[in-house]
Image (spheres, rainbow, N blue to C red):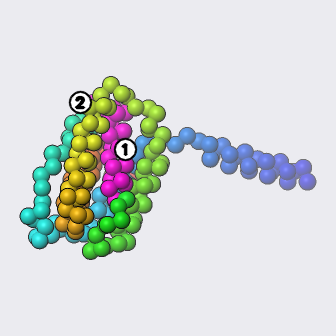
């Protein structure tokens, strides 16, 4: 009986130790890539019928600038986090296109939400020295995107413009800021 109690206690302590191990506070690169691919694949190429509604929006590349450092600063990593939060807000609308692959759209929304929830811990480690400048650029950019959707009454073409912009944003993050993302088995 005592041996059984000791065995159960040992198993419990091992499980408690494993569950309490700290997890790295970083966005997962593979999930950002999957998010990009789902967004790309849910609607195909930019529709020809939407070309006239396509508008230029200045991309805030400075919000993701690394200033020569191999690793993105904590405020730069938070810029990626804020980008995901803005994407989640945009896709929280009820008027999403029904022409898109609904399964991919749902998976996209779930993965964006998961990334936000799993990365809340980075909120406490923000280097505020340059974050305000980064945040201002992101707020302007996503404000412009939200305005386009509203001005075009949440039309299919307005959402295609949004999808095009977000694809560019996610691709930029993957190409220029992948060192700030956590990659499990990077090849």
Q: Is residue 82 left or right of residue 66?
A: right
Q: Position of residue 90 (x, y in %)?
A: 32, 56
Q: Secondary structure at mark 2?
A: loop
Residue 71 can be seen, yes or no: no
To which residue does mark 1 refer?
A: 81
Q: Residue at x 47, y 48 (%)?
A: 118
Q: Work out which quarter of the rendered image holds the N terminus and state it.
A: bottom right
Residue 40: x %, y % from top left: 25, 63
Asked whether, in this view, residue 68 is left or right of residue 22, the answer is left
In the image, 98 versus 31, the foreground residue is: 98
Residue sticking out furthest to the right: 1
| Left or right of residue 37: residue 45 | left
Q: Secondary structure at mark 1?
A: helix
- Residue interval drawn in magenta: 68-91
| Mark 1 and mark 2: Cα distance apart in space | 19 Å
Number of callouts: 2
Closest to the camera, between mark 1 and mark 2, is 1
Task: State the residue position of label 2.
Answer: 67
Residue 51 seen in this snapshot: yes
The question of residue 73 being in magenta is answered with yes
Q: Which residue extends farthest left?
A: 52
């Amino acid at each position: 009986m005592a041996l059984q109690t000791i065995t159960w206690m040992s198993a419990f302590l091992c499980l408690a130790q494993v569950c309490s191990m700290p997890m790295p506070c970083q966005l997962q690169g593979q999930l950002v890539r999957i998010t990009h691919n789902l967004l790309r694949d849910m609607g195909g190429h930019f529709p020809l019928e939407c070309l006239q509604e396509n508008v230029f929006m200045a991309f805030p590349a400075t919000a993701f600038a690394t200033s020569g450092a191999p690793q993105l600063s904590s405020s730069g990593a938070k810029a990626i986090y804020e980008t995901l939060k803005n994407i989640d807000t945009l896709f929280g609308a009820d008027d999403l296109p029904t022409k898109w692959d609904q399964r991919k759209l749902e998976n996209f929304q779930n993965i964006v939400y998961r990334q936000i929830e799993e990365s809340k811990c980075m909120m406490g480690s923000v280097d505020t020295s340059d974050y305000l400048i980064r945040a201002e650029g992101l707020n302007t950019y996503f404000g412009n995107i939200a305005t386009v959707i509203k001005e075009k009454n949440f039309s299919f073409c307005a959402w295609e413009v949004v999808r095009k912009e977000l694809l560019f944003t996610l691709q930029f993050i993957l190409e220029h800021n992948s060192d700030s993302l956590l990659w499990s088995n990077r090849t």
